[in-house]
Image (cartoon, rainbow, N blue to C red):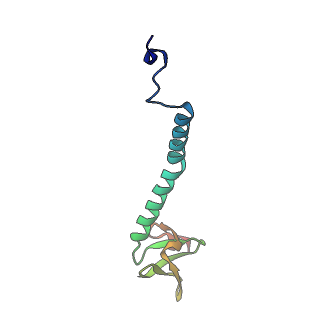
Amino acid sequence: MDESQTQPSSFLFGDPIFVFFIGFLLIIYFMSIRPQQKKMKALQTMMDDLEKGDEVVAAGGIIGRIKEIKGPYVSIEVSENITFKLQKTAIANTLPKGTIASID
């Protein structure tokens, strides 16, 4: 009998532990790494699209309207004559136009 006929050919799949390890890495990628990358991309797009007059929520929950944008910093007006200067990364979300007026 030929040796090639007695031993099963497992060249394609290799060791079962190796296959399990590759499967585990794929699960980790699709369950945690990829969603985090999508979230970071959406956050970067939101920060790039900020404009003067947008209504935003800061990370601390402060709601205001963007008064000025200078590089990586924004000034948000939370009330008349009260302005906070924040980094763009401190902006948590943008709000629909008119949200601040509906809250008052």
Between 2 and 40, the one nearer to me in the picture: 2
Task: Give the residue displayed 49% in from the left and 19% down from the top.
Answer: 7
Residue 25, percent from left and from top: 53, 44
Task: Give the residue displayed 48% in from the left and 15% down from the top.
Answer: 6
Task: Give the residue displayed 47% in from the left and 30% down from the top.
Answer: 13
Between 50 and 82, the one nearer to me in the picture: 50
Between 40 and 68, the one nearer to me in the picture: 40
Outermost top residue? 1
Location of the N terminus (image quadrant):
top left
Outermost right residue? 60
Judged left or right of residue 32, residue 67 is left
| Tally of numbered discs | 0
Location of the C terminus (image quadrant):
bottom right
Please tell me whether residue 42 is drawn above or below residue 99 in the rendered image: above
Residue 23, percent from left and from top: 52, 38
Judged left or right of residue 44, residue 17 is right
Please tell me whether residue 5 is drawn above or below residue 41 in the rendered image: above
Residue 81, percent from left and from top: 52, 89
Between 78 and 6, the one nearer to me in the picture: 6
Residue 24, percent from left and from top: 55, 41
Task: Give the residue displayed 46% in from the left and 17% down from the top.
Answer: 3
